[in-house]
Image (cartoon, rainbow, N blue to C red):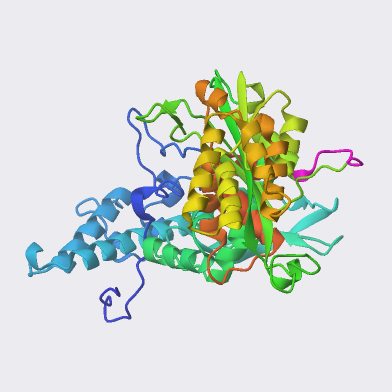
């Protein structure tokens, strides 16, 4: 809701921090540590220079901030930032409560106003501190990326949206006569090169862009943090971050340290993602006219399942699952010199998780040839299991085709076939289905499906070894990782955009967003060096 106008001016939007305090340390205010002074650890997040001591200079740094302008009584010395900020807030609280007392207080409006006030003052302090430092222009010439020599050509202002408020900073500007381009070294040092968003805001954009639609993300930024980023900019920056996350996925695949679980599972599946028309030209599909509305995004998941449910069946261990997904080719051709792109993606994920080194590897799938080919090419010796529930779905499909939907005869036939499946009597199952292959296309296809996957259907043996026999984990991953974010009403994607957001979302839901951000910060630091 709008806040009361201050000093007769218009109501202002609240500018604050995101809920649960997750981003409070993105651009932290200085706070002493136990046993010493200095800023708090930043846990690998991008961080601006600490706002302390002479860099701020008390009144000089904060400028015209009302109550912060007062000097201490008696000796005329300027108060420190902390004292002045506390004094200003105390005055603000007194003015807001007034004579009405606490019981008559509009608590929501008051805390929102105070939060806005604190962040606005901190933003002014940050702006003053950055603009007081001209060390970025200490050299008359700097090397340009083209190989030429750029000369100092003054200072140029730039407005940045930070987690505190909008700030305007001035940076030394260098111009290269050889290539005609210019650059500001401080932009790279602060992590704002090519962006008008601070690293803290950019991190928030990545979080909302991975979770919800771009329009909803823009709304969440304003509702929870008081930060206004237009929908199109949320889209642009989220996809840019997603492309960086895709690079992180390609380049960082170190094996885990420490002992590995005894058994690890690999699942692969695909799900259709709605695409723009230009991405579907000439592609056959399931529409009445033979066209397609989607492209298949393939997903792999790796997890452990040492936990047992109340019936003693294995169930996925909490927090053990990670994902990788993209719209890309999975089939490796005989003439290819390298594995198909998705096969390489699965290899990288397996290396990150240590799947390739696990003492017992299990691959579960729905029977699509491409996924078994990847397992055979990349992980020979892996136990392959056809998802039991997919196998039973095929039995029910045949029953409906033979006896009609919902008939007693169809239910009885399905029950017998499922018992044969559960008991491991696969030859009997195949024989019973194949009896109808001459008059039923569904039965003919099911016969071939079971015959091809027969070695993967020894369910009594698999269950006696304590193994999972269903691919529900990866199917759920298709829904929660891909579907929830990318298959909502009205969404239409380009391949580039879909792959970028898939990379960003997989990074988030796999618990790697912090590692990605540390990697990104390290790259920026290396460029600035």
419 over 119 or under it: above or below: above
Q: Position of residue 431 (x, y in %)?
A: 67, 38
Residue 335 colored in magenta in the image: yes
236 over 390 or under it: above or below: below
Q: 373 or 111, which lies in front?
A: 373
- Left/right placement of residue 394 relative to residue 337 reads left
Q: 43 or 339, which lies in front?
A: 339
Q: Which contiguous range is marked in magenta?
A: 334-341
Residue 15 seen in the figure: no
Which residue sits at x=84%, y=53%?
A: 146
- The quadrant in which residue 59 appears is bottom left
Prevailing secondary structure of the magenta residues: loop
Q: Quadrant of the C terminus?
A: top right
284 over 502 or under it: above or below: below
- Left/right placement of residue 347 relative to residue 514 reads right
- The quadrant in which residue 339 appears is top right
Q: Position of residue 154 (x, y in %)?
A: 67, 63
- Left/right placement of residue 373 relative to residue 303 reads right
Q: 504 or 468, which lies in front?
A: 468
Q: Position of residue 189 (x, y in %)?
A: 62, 48
Q: 364 or 422, which lies in front?
A: 422
Which residue sits at x=58%, y=22%?
A: 257
Q: Quadrant of the N terminus?
A: bottom left
Q: How many marks?
A: 0
Residue 54 seen in the figure: yes
Residue 162 colored in magenta in the image: no
- Left/right placement of residue 137 relative to residue 97 reads right
Which residue sits at x=42%, y=66%?
A: 222
Q: Position of residue 9 (x, y in %)?
A: 31, 80
């Amino acid at each position: 809701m709008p806040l009361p106008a201050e000093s007769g001016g218009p109501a202002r939007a609240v500018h604050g921090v995101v809920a649960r305090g997750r981003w409070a340390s993105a651009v932290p205010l200085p706070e002493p540590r136990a046993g010493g002074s200095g800023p708090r650890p930043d846990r690998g997040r991008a961080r601006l220079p600490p706002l302390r001591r002479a860099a701020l200079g008390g009144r000089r740094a904060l400028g015209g901030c009302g109550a912060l302008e007062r000097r201490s009584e008696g000796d005329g010395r300027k108060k420190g930032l902390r004292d002045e900020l506390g004094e200003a807030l105390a005055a603000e609280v007194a003015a807001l409560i007034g004579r009405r007392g606490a019981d008559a207080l509009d608590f929501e409006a008051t805390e929102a106003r105070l939060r806005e006030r604190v962040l606005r003052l901190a933003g002014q302090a940050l702006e003053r501190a950055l603009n007081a430092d001209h060390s970025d222009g200490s050299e008359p010439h700097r090397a340009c990326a083209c190989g030429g020599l750029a000369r100092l050509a003054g200072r140029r202002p730039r407005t940045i949206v930070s987690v505190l408020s909008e700030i305007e900073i001035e940076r030394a500007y260098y111009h290269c006569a050889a290539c005609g381009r210019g650059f500001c070294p401080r932009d790279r040092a602060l992590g704002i090169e090519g962006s008008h968003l601070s690293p803290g805001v950019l991190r928030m954009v990545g979080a909302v862009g991975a979770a919800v639609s771009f329009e909803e993300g823009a709304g969440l930024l304003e509702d929870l943090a008081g930060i206004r980023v237009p929908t199109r900019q949320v889209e642009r920056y989220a996809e840019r971050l997603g492309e960086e996350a895709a690079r992180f996925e390609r380049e960082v695949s170190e094996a885990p340290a420490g002992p590995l679980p005894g058994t690890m599972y690999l699942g692969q599946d695909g799900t259709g993602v709605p695409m723009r028309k230009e991405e579907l030209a000439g592609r056959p599909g399931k529409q009445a006219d033979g066209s397609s509305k989607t492209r298949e995004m393939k997903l792999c998941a790796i997890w452990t399942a040492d936990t047992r449910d109340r019936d003693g069946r294995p169930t996925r261990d909490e927090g053990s699952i990670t994902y990788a997904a993209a719209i890309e080719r999975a089939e490796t051709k005989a003439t290819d010199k390298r594995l198909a792109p998705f096969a390489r993606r699965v290899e990288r994920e397996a290396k990150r998780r240590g799947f390739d080194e696990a003492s017992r590897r299990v691959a579960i799938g729905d029977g699509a040839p491409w996924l078994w080919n990847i397992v055979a090419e990349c992980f020979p010796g892996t136990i392959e299991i056809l998802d039991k529930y997919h196998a039973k779905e095929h039995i029910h499909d045949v029953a409906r085709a033979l006896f009609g939907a919902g008939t007693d005869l169809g239910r009885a036939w399905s029950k017998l076939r499922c018992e044969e499946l559960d008991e491991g009597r696969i030859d009997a199952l195949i024989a019973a289905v194949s009896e109808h292959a001459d008059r039923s296309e569904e039965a003919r296809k099911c016969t071939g499906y079971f015959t091809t996957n027969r070695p993967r259907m020894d369910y009594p043996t698999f269950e006696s070894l304590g193994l999972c026999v269903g691919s529900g984990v990866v199917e759920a991953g298709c829904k929660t990782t891909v579907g929830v974010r990318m298959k909502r009403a009205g969404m239409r994607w380009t391949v580039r955009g879909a792959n970028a957001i898939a990379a960003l979302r997989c990074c988030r839901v796999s618990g790697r967003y912090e590692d990605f951000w540390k990697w990104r910060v390290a790259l920026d630091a290396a460029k600035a060096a």
